[in-house]
Image (tube, rainbow, N blue to C red):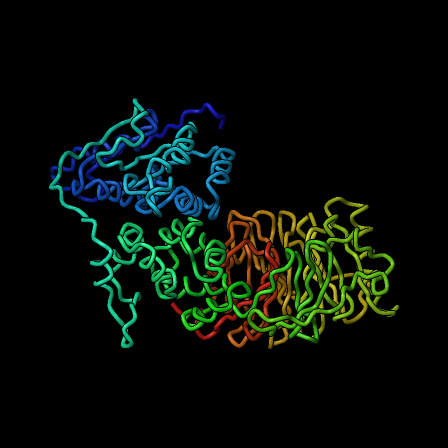
Amino acid sequence: MTAGTTVTTTVTPDIAAWPPLDEDRRAPGQRLLDWAADGEEPRLCLVRGVRGSGKSALLAWLLAGTVGRPGLTIHATVPSEGLTTETFAWELGRQLGYGALSPSRLLDQVTADERPLLLLVPDLHRSGAGPADLPSAAPETLVAELLEPLLALPYVRAAVEVGTSGLLATHSGAAVVDLGEGDGRGTVQASYADLAASVPRTTDDRPDWSRAPDPVRRRILDAALRTDGQEAAVRGLLTDPGFLVHGSAAALTATLADERIPVPGRLREVWRRAAPELTAYHADSAERAALLHAAAVGTDPDLSEYLRPLAAQHWWSAVWSRPTRPVTALALIPGEERRLMASDATGRLRTYDVEGGTGGPLTASPRVFDEAAASPSVHPLAVRPRSLAPRDARSALLLDGSDALLPLVTEDDPTTAFALGRIAEHHGAAALNEEESLVTALGGGGARSPYAVVGDRGGTVHVWSLGEYQDVPRSHRVHEQPVTAAVCVDTADGLTLTFSAGADGSVRLWEISAEPMPVPVQQRPYRTTALAAADTSAGPVLAVAWSDGELHLWHVLSGRVRALSWLRECDALALTPEGLLAIGDSEGLSAVRLRWDGLWEG
């Protein structure tokens, strides 16, 4: 599609097939439906009317009618009350499948994709949050910074609720659905004192935000910013861990963006780190506590300790964090499963204790790329491992950023050096003979004996034993596209399961004594960034990190999948049988504890 293409549809709407409407709303409903279905209509439809006239309900009616009905698709619906440009962009990005992107990155992504989009934007006239003297509090800011640029794209259409405001009035050719005057009833702006008085109290007379009415939790921070005792009221909310977990994440994001407002400890930094996930509609209170606690671990010890009891109620919670350089490769060390081998973006390779403790120092090995320790074939300025397969704590295969397999042996061990060098030589020679044999992925694993799993551009997976000499690997073409990640795990019943990801977004399973499964175990339209697997008390579990920021845990025996909402895109993973998941990302190395007894519930 070119930039000047007009989006058209061929849907013939029948309002009788939609959910029923009151008689006085049938005409506006038909007008809205006609606009949505006809690509020749103006690309903007303004839904107008006073409070209580049913504007939001009409947009909800349109959305409900498209469910299960082909031909008319609403690509995203973003209720805008209390959202700023930033929080609106995060939610729109999530619904469009990009993840929580900044406004500028979201605009770049939508511009580059050029896909037709139909958006619903309820309550635009109620958008804005934070101190009233800042632009973020005004709906006009969201319009100017994001909605106008989106509507300038010829393949974006939107139905926007504007109330009786003049928002988007410069679009003179916009379609208009006017619901008239209505009954004038709606939400009345309550005072901070009234809202605070309606919050239930605990037995020791503290606010119990878990039982507070939802409208109170959504509006009390904005009311505190307007009250006469603003500073004390706002400070009371920002120093209450219960409110941080249960209050409006969008309002907290806007308020904490104001550097004039004093905050305890490093709350502003912690919140900023977690805010994109905290504002997601899927985040319940237990998950919000786990996310905020994870952002506080290693950054704000006091806040971390306050949040720990709340985070412990979730099926995952952070254990420790090692904020250093970005971690690009990560694996458990065979035979020493309580230790991790990790590489950072500079090429430094270290080992860590998996039970390092919250915010505490981790046991790290000396830098193995020192001239005295490294093999002469490995140079610190030339090697940037993007994945690795350890043989033990002193030797490993590395996959460099240049797609070269390299042996690493840190002691005078000719036997190990020869075995690892043989694997690297085998794949190097194959790549010279055939471009499809170029190595694109490397992973490790194996409890009985260490393995290296090598994936290539042609979609073939090769499994090598690192515990004994092999002249050739076990190989099978598993993917139609290049392999992007691989890992293997031994099970209690003697099987060796190999998991691999392809560039087409497929994740496949191959038990190396049989044929690969004929269909993917998971398929998504995103790139897999990391894999990890372990044989746990609940059976084999696979962890999959995706390029849209999602992190999935797959229970192999039942096929059930749970999503772990991490703070950043994961670049490397390692999983222990006891349920400790180590995560390497742009901010360093972290670990979370998974509760196997609660993971597959719900």
Question: What residue sits 27% from the left and 66% below the top?
Answer: 211
In the image, 284: left or right of 539?
A: left
Task: Write down the quadrant of residue 44 in the picture.
Answer: top left
Q: Nearer the viewer, residue 593 or 293?
A: 293
x, y percentage for residue 112?
52, 34
Q: Is residue 114 above or below residue 263?
A: above
Task: Write down the quadrant of residue 249 in the picture.
Answer: bottom left
Q: Is residue 57 above or below residue 309?
A: above
Question: What residue sits 29% from the left and 58% below the top?
Answer: 217
x, y percentage for residue 64?
27, 45
Question: What residue sits 26% from the left and 36% below the top?
Answer: 162
x, y percentage for residue 274?
47, 56
x, y percentage for residue 380?
79, 55
Question: What residue sits 61% from the left and 73% below the top?
Answer: 356
Q: In which quadrant will I find the C terminus?
A: bottom left
Q: Is residue 333 above or below residue 223?
A: below
Q: Nearer the viewer, residue 579 or 122?
A: 122
Task: Write down the quadrant of residue 172 in the picture.
Answer: top left
What is the tally of numbered marks visible in this picture? 0
